[in-house]
Image (cartoon, rainbow, N blue to C red):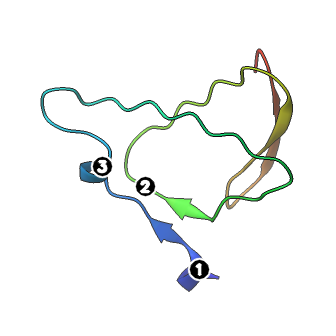
């Protein structure tokens, strides 16, 4: 499984002048690729629900989580 993990780099998302990034992702019955990174990730659910998966647990998420 280790070879299936996508290693994300901060330089691909942020720059020194604005070290934040916002992305809008819509998925239906799709499981994103396993990934890791050395930066913080915040997820805001606008509507619907899902599961946030890490290597150690699965956490149900929904609007307001």
Residue 31: percent from left, percent from top: 76, 59
At numbered mark 1, what does the secondary structure look like: helix, strand or loop? helix
**Badge 3 is on which residue?**
10
Residue 64: percent from left, percent from top: 77, 14
Q: Residue furthest top?
A: 64
Residue count near mark 3 (Cα–Cα under 10 Å), binned few <14, some 14–19, many ≥20 = some
Q: Which residue lies furthest to the left in this view?
A: 17
Residue 2: percent from left, percent from top: 57, 81
Location of the N terminus by quadrant is: bottom right
Q: Is residue 62 left or right of residue 19?
A: right
Marks 1 and 3 sit apart, C-alpha to C-alpha, by 19 Å
Q: Residue at x 80, y 22 (%)?
A: 47
Residue 5: percent from left, percent from top: 55, 73
- The answer to whether the residues at label 2 and label 3 have Cβ atoms under 8 Å apart is yes
- Quick one: label 1 or label 3, which is nearer the N terminus? 1
Residue 37: assigned label: 2
Q: Which of 59 and 63 is in front in this view?
A: 63
Residue 63: assigned label: none
- The answer to whether the residues at label 2 and label 1 have Cβ atoms under 8 Å apart is no
Marks 2 and 1 sit apart, C-alpha to C-alpha, by 14 Å
Q: Residue at x 64, y 24 (%)?
A: 44
At numbered mark 3, what does the secondary structure look like: helix, strand or loop? helix
Residue count near mark 2 (Cα–Cα under 10 Å), binned few <14, some 14–19, many ≥20 = few
**Badge 1 is on which residue?**
4
- Quick one: label 2 or label 1, which is nearer the N terminus? 1
């Amino acid at each position: 499984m280790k070879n299936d993990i996508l290693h994300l780099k901060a330089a691909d998302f942020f720059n020194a002048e604005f070290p934040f990034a916002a992305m809008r992702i819509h998925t239906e019955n799709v499981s994103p690729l396993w990934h890791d990174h050395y930066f913080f990730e915040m997820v805001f659910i606008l509507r619907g629900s899902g599961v946030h998966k890490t290597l150690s647990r699965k956490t149900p998420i929904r609007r307001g989580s």
